[in-house]
Image (cartoon, grey):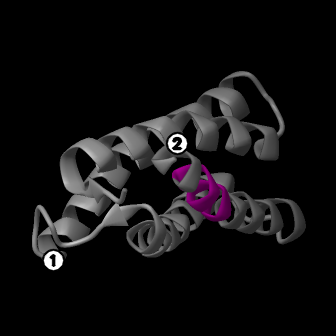
Amino acid sequence: MKLVRYVFVGGAAAAVDIGFFTIAVKTLHYDWFFVAILSFVLATAINYLLSVRYVFESGVRFKWGVELSLVFLVSGVGLLANQTVLWFFIEAEKFDEVFAKMMATSTVFLWNYTARSRFIFRVLR
């Protein structure tokens, strides 16, 4: 059940991430590299807010400030993976940016859930 809830939370954050990225890159013609960082940070914030409401029990293992710092540390690793996958598909393989973003987002999804549930939060029952 917890993974199902996280799929919905992650899906909402992914929709924001991919949607913002698509509009900025395809419509406004901004560079994918910097837009990907901004959309990832925005999605991370949304994911955190929804996760502590619907998936994880906040404040159990760590105080709020430490918990939030750990979330962004875990997400920093995810951002590095995100940017690497994007670079590979966009620059090396010449795939469409939005396709690359979907691949990167799905790659990082499992990392985020596993790291958050094992190291940061206690999962709601």
Identify the residue at horizontal 61%, vertical 44% (top origin). 105
Of 91 and 19, which appears nearest the observer?
19
Residue 116 at x, y percent in the picture: 31, 50
Tell me which amino acid carries mark 2: Phe
Of 28 and 21, which appears nearest the observer?
21
Horizontally, residue 49 falls left or right of residue 72, namely right
Answer with the quarter of the image where residue 61 lies.
Answer: bottom left
Q: Separation of disc 1 and disc 2 at Cα?
A: 23 Å
Q: Which residues are magenta?
A: 6-13
Tell me which amino acid carries mark 1: Gly
Where is 115 relative to 12, above or below? above
Q: Which residue is mark 2?
A: 109
Q: Which residue is mark 1?
A: 65
Q: Which residue is at the far right?
A: 27
Identify the residue at horizontal 13%, vertical 69% (top origin). 66
Secondary element type, mark 1: helix
